[in-house]
Image: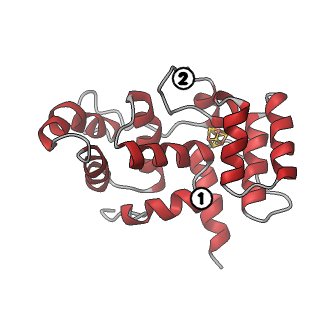
């Protein structure tokens, strides 16, 4: 296969409709600040690989964003290797897999970092305001925040999926960001 399953020109639109909160957030930070720190590049980069963005397009996408804030020489020297590495094209040539929710939930997120799981790592006020901004009503926000306070992060994510897809009950609980994407895409196919 040498064709992208997902065109990088669609990422803005897909991030709003089909990405889980963790990936939508990183897409927004990347496209507004033109940078993501190391762990964010990994978590978001491997997710993009998982939805079917091939290496050439991924490199083009990251270069386009990063070079809005730095020259392309610096991107090539300092960052390009990261993306080759994610696709197993350099180094030990491991074909890395996208991270599962558990792995993301268990990760450490330091100051200024944007990776991690919003339901686990964000403070309540910020999470509430983002849920609001993304169209979850007051009742839904309440339900999600109760799940979060009981540490049911993946159930909170599943609830978010249901509320933003007009579903009473999702077919499956969310356990992987790439599964979230696939289930969301499936709902739009008739
Ligand atoms: Fe992302 Fe998983 Fe957290 Fe949902 S539960 S926001 S898919 S890490």
Residue at 59% across, 55% down: 181
Return the x and y of residue 98 as percentages of the image width and height.
Answer: 49, 40
Asked whether residue 171 appears in the rendered view, the answer is no
Q: Which residue is mark 1?
A: 182
Numbered disc total? 2
First reached walking from the N terminus: tag 2 or tag 1? 2
Q: Nearer the viewer, residue 133 or 144?
A: 133
Q: Quadrant of the N terminus?
A: bottom left
Query: From the viewer's perspective, is residue 178 above or below residue 149?
Result: below
Q: Which residue is mark 2?
A: 109
Query: From the viewer's perspective, is residue 119 above or below residue 23?
Result: above
Residue at the outermost bottom position = 190
Residue at 26% across, 48% down: 68
Quadrant location, ligand no. 1:
top right
In the image, taking residue 68 as reference, residue 40 lies left or right, namely right
Return the x and y of residue 54 as percentages of the image width and height.
Answer: 33, 54
**Residue at disc 1, secondary structure:** helix
Q: For residue 124, what is the image quadrant?
A: top right
Ligand 1 is within 8 Å of the C-beta of the residue at disc 2? no
**Residue at disc 2, secondary structure:** loop
Return the x and y of residue 42 as percentages of the image width and height.
Answer: 41, 34
Residue at 79% across, 41% down: 155
- Marks 2 and 1: CB-CB under 8 Å? no
Mark 1 neighbour class, 10 Å CA radius: few under 14, some 14 to 19, many 20 or more: some
Return the x and y of residue 138 as percentages of the image width and height.
Answer: 84, 51
Q: CA distance from mark 2 to mark 1?
A: 26 Å
Q: Nearer the viewer, residue 36 or 156?
A: 36
In the image, taking residue 1 as reference, residue 100 lies left or right, namely right
The mark lying in front, picked from 2 and 1, is 2
């Amino acid at each position: 296969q040498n064709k992208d399953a997902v065109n990088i020109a669609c990422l803005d639109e897909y991030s709003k409709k089909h990405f889980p909160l963790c990936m939508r957030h990183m897409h927004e930070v990347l496209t507004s600040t033109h940078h993501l720190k190391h762990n964010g590049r990994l978590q978001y980069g491997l997710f993009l690989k998982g939805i079917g963005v091939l290496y050439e397009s991924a490199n083009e996408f990251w270069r386009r964003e990063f070079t809005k804030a730095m020259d392309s020489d610096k991107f090539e020297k300092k960052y390009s290797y990261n993306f080759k590495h994610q696709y197993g094209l350099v180094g030990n040539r491991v074909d890395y897999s996208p991270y599962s929710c558990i792995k993301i939930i268990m990760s450490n997120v330091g100051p200024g970092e944007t990776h991690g799981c919003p339901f686990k790592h964000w403070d309540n006020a910020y999470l509430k305001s983002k849920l609001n901004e993304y169209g979850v009503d007051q009742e839904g926000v309440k339900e999600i925040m109760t799940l979060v306070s009981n540490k049911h992060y993946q159930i909170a994510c599943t609830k978010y999926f249901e509320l933003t897809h007009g579903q009473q009950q999702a077919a499956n609980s969310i356990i992987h960001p790439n599964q979230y994407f696939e289930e969301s895409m499936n709902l739009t196919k008739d």
